[in-house]
Amino acid sequence: MGIFNPVQIFADIVTYDWLSVTNEYWGDAINFFIYDIIKITLLLLVINYVMAITRYYFPMEKARDILIRRKWYGFDYLLAALLGVITPFCSCSSIPLFVGFVSAGIPLGVTLAFLIASPLVNEASLFIFPTMFGLKMTIAYNFIGIAIAIAGGMLIQRLKMDQYINPEFLKFKSRSDAEKESGGEKIRLSKKLAYWWRDGMRISKSIFPYIVIGVGIGALIHGFVPKDFVETYLTIKRWWTVPLATLMGTPLYANSISVIPIIEALTQKGASLGTSLAFMTATVTLSIPSIFILKKAMSWQLLLAFLSVTSIGIMIIGYFFNWSVF
C-alpha cells in the first residue's frame, strides 16, 4: 500500500465510521470503491500533469526518430517492460501512464509492453515470491512475464493498430505550439503552469467517468463474489483449469499484494501452482475496471487484441508452472 496508506485509512473512516456500514459484503465493496477511486484519480492527475510538461519541453519527433533508428531490435520494448516492472501499479493505475505515453507520441506496441508488464511483474513477484515459492520459480516467473510483455507489444505493433487509438489522445502540444498561440512571446511560469494543468485535465476529464463505472463494477464483484466459489473450481486438476482460472480472474480486481492470501489458500487446498498463478495474473492484469478505462482510449478492435494477447500470455505462465519441475 505504501504511499497510499492515508487513502486506505480515509476509506476505512468513511466506510465504517461515517457511513457505519456493518454488512461485510457491502463494507468490502464500499471500502474498495472509495480507496481505488481516490488512488486512481490522484495517479491520473499527477501522471497527466507530468506528461503535459514532458510534451511541452521534449521534442516528440526526436523521440520517435530514436525509437525508429534503434541499434538493437526490441530494446525499446525491453525498456518499456522494465519500466513496468519498477512501477508498482495495478492494471487500472497503469492506464493513466499508458495514456500519457500514447499522447506523447510513443509507439503503441512499446506502450502496451509497459501496460502488460506493470501489473504482471510487480512487487509481489519480486519480493514476496522468493519466500513463498523459492528463488528459481521467482526468476522464471519474472523472466516469462517480461518476455510476454515484450512479445505482446511487438505483436500488436506488427498488426499496425495505431488507427484504433482514440484520436483525442493523440493531440498533444509542444513548446513551439504553445509559443505560437501566444504570438511568439516568451511564456511566464504562471501561464505555463496553467497551460500544463489544462492539457493534463483535458485527458483526465475524458477518462474519469469510465474510472467511476469500472471501479464501481469491480467493487461489487470484489465485495460479493464468495472466495469459496473460486476455490471449489480451481482445485480441480484438469487441463482446462488454467483457462478457467484466467477467465475467473478477469472480472475480479485486486492488486498483487491483496491477492497473495488467495494464492496461498488455493495451493494449500490442492490447486496446482500454475493454475493459482494464472488466476493471480488475470486478476491483477485484466479486470473489468481496466477494460472500461481502456475502452475510452481505444476501439474494440485494439482492446480485444490486447486482451487476447495478454490472456494467452497468462495461460502460458499457468501451463509452464503446472508442467515444470519448479
Image (spheres, helix red, strand yellow):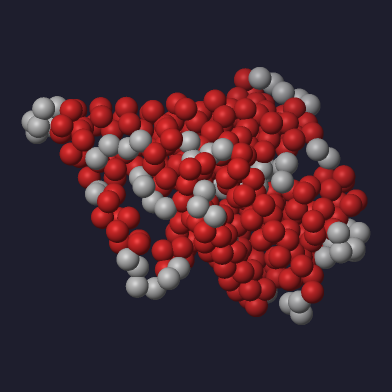
Identify the residue at the far top of this view: 19
Query: Image check: 170 left or right of 239?
Result: left
Identify the residue at the far left of this view: 185
Q: In x, y percent, where is residue 264?
A: 77, 59
* Of 207 and 9, the residue lying toward us: 207
Query: Image check: 262 left or right of 2?
Result: right
Q: What residue appears at the point 83 percent right and 40 percent down from the top-left corner? A: 226
Q: In x, y percent, where is residue 84?
A: 49, 57
Q: Is residue 122 visible?
A: no
* Of 199 and 296, the residue lying toward us: 296
Q: In x, y percent, where is residue 116?
A: 56, 55
Q: In x, y percent, where is residue 68?
A: 35, 62
Q: In the rendered picture of this protein, how many numbered marks are placed on residues? A: 0
Q: What residue appears at the point 60 percent right and 57 percent down from the top-left corner? A: 120
Toward which corner of the image does residue 159 lie, by quadrant?
Answer: bottom right
* Of 190 and 250, the residue lying toward us: 250
Q: What residue appears at the point 35 percent right and 61 percent down from the top-left corner? A: 67
Query: Image check: 104 left or right of 240?
Result: left
Query: Image check: 42 left or right of 10?
Result: left
Q: Image quadrant for the C terminus?
A: bottom right
Q: What residue appears at the point 79 percent right and 70 percent down from the top-left corner? A: 322
